[in-house]
Amino acid sequence: MADLDSSKIKNLYTLEQLQKAIASDPGAWRPLVLTNGCFDLIHAGHIRYLQQAKTLGRSLVVGLNSDSSVQTIKPAQPGLPSRPIVPQMQRAEVLAALKPVDGVVIFSETTATQLIEIFKPEIYVKGGDYTLETLPEAPAILAYGGQVALIQIEVPASTSTIIDRILQRS
């Protein structure tokens, strides 16, 4: 399958493009809400999470873990397919098409600390399965006075669980 043309994906930005967009029109972007993740197989839990995150500010930017960072975060396990299941450009296109998402930027680090330091979002959002103590990005956001919002998980779904269910049925 041919690679997707990133220039044809609305709301997908490089780091530099997004920096310029925010700087040139802060009124359209701020208050900025930032979240991040792998978003390997989009499910209802992701949708509700993103919908709630969007309500916290004017715009929602999703930092999408690159294929290489997903492989680091979720290393291959015996008997399971390697992650990600869906390549980064396809994951980016799906996320960018979702109504609550105003921008997607792919990043290669294992945490979103660098994105936080660059964009300085007013609000950084993660799932309620984290606490301030377990969230590696918390010090970066709190250092400049940003807020952390932990969104309660409404739909107990996970990509790993979905993969396990599929494998059990095969």
Image (cartoon, rainbow, N blue to C red):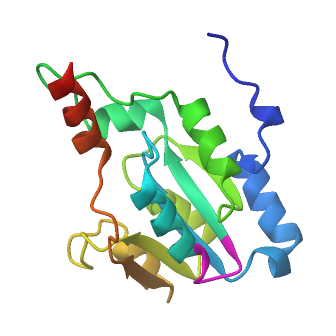
Looking at the image, which is closer to me, 165 or 31?
A: 165
Q: Residue at x 39, y 27 (%)?
A: 85
Q: Position of residue 135 (x, y in %)?
A: 28, 69
- Residue furthest to the top in view is 1
Q: Residue furthest left?
A: 78
Residue located 53% across and 74% down the image: 53
Chief secondary structure of the magenta portion: loop
Q: How far across and down, in percent of the image, does residue 152 sit?
A: 33, 77
From this view, report whether residue 120 is shown above or below residue 159: below
State the extent of the magenta-drawn residues as a range: 54-59
Q: Position of residue 105 (x, y in %)?
A: 63, 49
Residue drawn at x 65%, y 55% as measured from the top left: 98
**Quadrant assignment, res 31:** bottom right
Residue farthest toward the bottom in the current orientation of the protein: 145
Q: Quadrant of residue 29?
A: bottom right
Percent coordinates x, y for residue 157 in the rendering? 30, 54
Is 81 drawn above or below residue 145 in the view shown? above
Viewport quadrant of the C terminus: top left
Direction from residue 7 to residue 71 in the image, left or right: left
Q: How many marks?
A: 0
Residue extending furthest right? 24
Question: Quarter holding the N terminus?
Answer: top right
132 up-or-down from 70: above or below: below
Is 46 colored magenta in this rendering? no
Residue lying at 34% horizontally and 71% vertically, measured from the top left: 154
